[in-house]
Amino acid sequence: MITPFRGEEIDYKVLLGFIEYASENHYDGLFPGGSTGGFASLSREKHAELLEDVIEESAGMKLFAGICRNNVDETIEMGKKAIDLGYTNLVSINPYYHKYSESSVENFFDRIIPALDADMYIYNNPSLSGFRLNPDLVERLKERHPQVVGMKDSGNDMDDFAKFLKIKGLKVYQGKDAYIHESILQGAAGGVCSTANFALNTLLLAKNKGDIEKTKAKTKKLVELVSNYEVPTIHNYLFRRFILNEQEPHNYVNPPFVDLKGIPDLMALRESTILPVDNR
């Protein structure tokens, strides 16, 4: 989910609006503190504030707390904070920026997982983290740590995705929007898709509802268009523009991100986007 800002503070009113949007459209859960939420740009204080705000207002929805701080001690600290707030599902990507070896990444997870008394989901997103989690590594972690119950795979590799699905007792969620329908048919537990922040495309594909082929085509086009813009700025902009109907969204992301100054693809984005009836 997005992390909406107004100036340099989390926009609580818009956060409530997003949670209401997700609830009314029957999304199964929320994932605060992920990539689309700009977790890597959040201070520890803002990260913790986000997790607290979401759990206070999301009764009845399954919640997955993103806890990664790119540092072992801080990640454990954020995980414990999430548990104290009431989260039972934690998500962590591997450490990023530095060129980590597989042994170092494995050591990171071996340190944080047993320190946290909650179900753990491993997050694979090599295009952003610089490291690709392979099925053998994930299987080793699963075997050593029974509390590893699932993963989000944004690896963009359906061969690896099929191998993740074969790991006994592991729930695998697809993180790439264009692959959601195919993944569900193969046995995925669901999808954690960034365009779901402002569109119903992937929800319909995950639920196998509506004109599947038309929705798949729209989603493919939508992903292509969104990829031309900065994450998470574009997702915040489109939620405000398409769902909240703000005509000129501004001051909605945290520094150093800046507002988008006009969207030349706005009409193409809207045409590729399945919106709630009230916002068509």
Image (tube, rainbow, N blue to C red):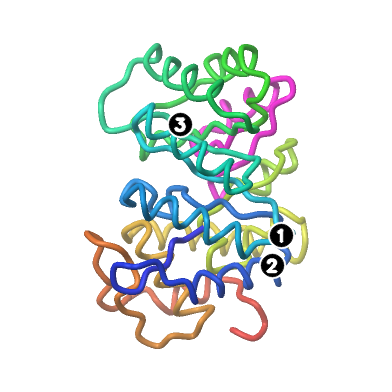
Magenta stretch?
151-178
Whether residue 170 is in magenta: the answer is yes
Q: Secondary structure at mark 2?
A: helix
Say which of 154 and 76 sits in front.
Answer: 76
Residue marked by disc 3:
76
- Helix, strand or loop under label 3: helix
Mark 3 vs 2, N-terminal side: 2
Q: Position of residue 20 (x, y in %)?
A: 63, 72
Which amino acid is tagged 3? Answer: Ile
* Disc sitting over residue 212 in the figure: 1
Q: CA distance from mark 3 to mark 2?
A: 30 Å
The residue at which mark 2 appears reads as 23
* Vertical side of 210 occupied by 127: above or below: above
Whole-percent x, y for residue 123 in the image: 51, 35
Q: In the figure, residue 204 lies in which quadrant?
A: bottom right
| Residue at 37% across, 73% down | 265
What amino acid type is highlighted by mark number 1? Ile
Dot 3 or dot 1: first in sequence order is 3
Quarter of the image with the C terminus is bottom right
Give, as a three-letter code, the residue at label 2. Ser
Q: Residue at x 69, y 33 (%)?
A: 171
Q: How many marks?
A: 3
Determine whether label 3 and label 2 are within 8 Å by CB. Answer: no
Helix, strand or loop at disc 1?
Answer: helix
